[in-house]
């Protein structure tokens, strides 16, 4: 063990973000578990208690208004604001929309017209290879889309 893990809990800095602040045993070494969301301790050191969970929910709820205010300031920022880049503004807008059930589709559908004249200058060997690849891809897709028949 390193000197950091041998240090006593009081006055000791956490070894990682969100580390439980409870003592592991009578030796006073710091607990190595992750603290529960909205708390400073893990389940074993009191995080599972109903009153601790209620207090954690209240602490997290108190952060909603300031978070919305930050999102609003990002959305309202001027185009050349050095603190709120366009990427940050878009991310803030998406976050607000996602949290309000207006999430965009995660699916991308590409539709294009096929124009055979684009291949007029291709050598015959390349066209044959392209057709073979297209057929192979179609067969693979059909095989994965085919219903599975159950045996007796």
Image (cartoon, rainbow, N blue to C red):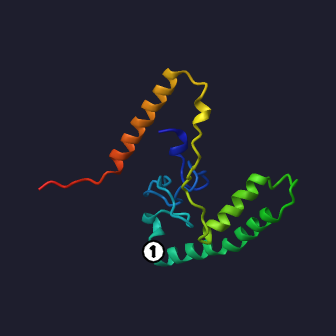
Q: Is residue 133 left or right of residue 111?
A: left
The image quadrant of residue 75 is bottom right
Q: Is residue 17 left or right of residue 141?
A: right
Image point (75%, 65%), residue name: 70
Q: Is residue 49 left or right of residue 86?
A: left
Q: How many numbered dots are placed on residues in this image? A: 1
User: Looking at the rendering, in which quadrant would you find the C terminus?
Assistant: bottom left
Name the secondary structure under disc 1. loop
Task: Indicate the position of residue 1 as horizontal and vertical percent values.
Answer: 47, 39
Task: Please say if 134 is above or below 84.
Answer: above
Task: Indicate the position of residue 68 as horizontal and vertical percent values.
Answer: 71, 70
Q: Is residue 90 left or right of residue 33?
A: right
Task: Please say if 85 is above or below 2.
Answer: below
- Which residue, given by chain and number where applicable, does mark 1 sit on? 49
Task: Indicate the position of residue 103 as horizontal and vertical percent values.
Answer: 60, 65
Neighbour tally class for label 1: few under 14, some 14-19, many 20 plus, Cα within 10 Å: few
Image point (54%, 47%), residue name: 7
Q: Nearer the viewer, residue 92 or 52?
A: 92
Q: Nearer the viewer, residue 80 or 125?
A: 125
């Amino acid at each position: 063990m390193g000197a950091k893990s041998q240090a006593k809990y009081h006055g000791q800095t956490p070894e990682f973000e969100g580390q439980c602040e409870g003592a592991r045993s009578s030796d006073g070494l710091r607990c190595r578990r992750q603290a529960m969301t909205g708390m400073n301790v893990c389940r074993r050191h009191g995080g599972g208690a109903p009153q601790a969970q209620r207090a954690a929910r209240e602490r997290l709820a108190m952060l909603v208004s300031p978070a919305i205010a930050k999102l609003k300031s990002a959305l309202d920022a001027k185009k050349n604001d050095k603190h709120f880049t366009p990427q940050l503004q878009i991310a803030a807008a998406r976050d607000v929309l996602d949290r309000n059930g207006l999430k965009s589709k995660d699916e991308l559908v590409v539709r294009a017209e096929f124009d055979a004249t684009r291949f007029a200058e291709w050598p015959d060997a390349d066209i044959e290879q392209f057709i073979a690849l297209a057929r192979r891809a179609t067969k693979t897709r059909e095989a994965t889309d085919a219903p599975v028949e159950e045996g007796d």
